Image (tube, helix red, strand yellow):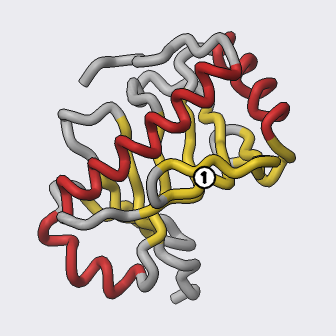
């Protein structure tokens, strides 16, 4: 894995290039992990230092309207970005994290999450991350500088 590819992102063009790159790479990652193409409409670009984070937040705000926040702001794009079978509609900028040297990550649309988990978890060289409200399957591979996730619907309280 090439650490910090694209970083520091200094222009809107480079940000758009990184968005397209992440979208393409997570599709290839899914094909390698489970042998099927999966699509995404939401992805995250990882910032690698506070200055890059501030710049990326400004650029993201130019591309869309604030949508919500989790480890950094997320915007709903004014114009969706089509890449292969995917149409990216949401972009998040992740706060710097020394444990995240990747370019970014994406959430896959897998339809029925629990059916997907039953069919493919044995083939994914990764793991299930459990949160109180949901769980997710992380896709990763040392040959890729992106991560991807299949996320469950909200789980009902026990």
Q: Within 10 angstroms of label 1, few (less than 14), some, or many (20 or more) residues?
A: many
Q: How many marks?
A: 1
Q: Is residue 33 left or right of residue 108?
A: left
Q: Position of residue 135 (x, y in %)?
A: 44, 69
The quadrant in which the N terminus is found is top left
Work out whether 45 lies above or below 51: below
Which of the pair 12/94 is nearer the observer?
Answer: 12
- Percent x, y for residue 112? 42, 85
The secondary element bearing badge 1 is classed as strand
Task: Identify which residue is drawn at 13% across, 66% down.
Answer: 123
Side (left or right) of 148 relative to 42? left
Residue at image point 53% right, 18% down: 48
The front one of 82 and 156 is: 82
Q: Which residue is mark 1?
A: 88
Image location of residue 114, percent across then percent down: 36, 84
- The answer to whether 89 appears left or right of 85 in the picture is right
Identify the residue at image location x=58%, y=78%: 154
């Amino acid at each position: 894995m090439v650490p910090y590819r694209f970083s520091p992102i200094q222009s809107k063009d480079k940000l758009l290039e990184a968005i397209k790159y992440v979208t393409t790479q997570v599709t290839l990652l899914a094909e390698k992990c489970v042998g099927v193409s999966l699509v995404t409409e939401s992805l995250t670009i990882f910032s690698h230092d506070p200055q890059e984070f501030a710049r990326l937040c400004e650029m993201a705000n130019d591309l869309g309207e604030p949508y919500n926040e989790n480890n950094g702001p997320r915007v709903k794009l004014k114009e969706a970005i089509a890449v292969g079978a995917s149409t990216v509609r949401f972009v998040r900028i992740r706060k710097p994290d020394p444990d995240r040297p990747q370019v970014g990550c994406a959430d896959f649309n897998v339809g029925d999450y629990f059916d997907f988990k039953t069919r493919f978890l044995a083939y994914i060289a990764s793991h299930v991350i459990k949160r109180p409200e949901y769980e997710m399957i992380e896709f990763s591979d040392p040959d890729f500088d992106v991560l991807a996730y299949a996320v469950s619907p909200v789980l009902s309280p026990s």
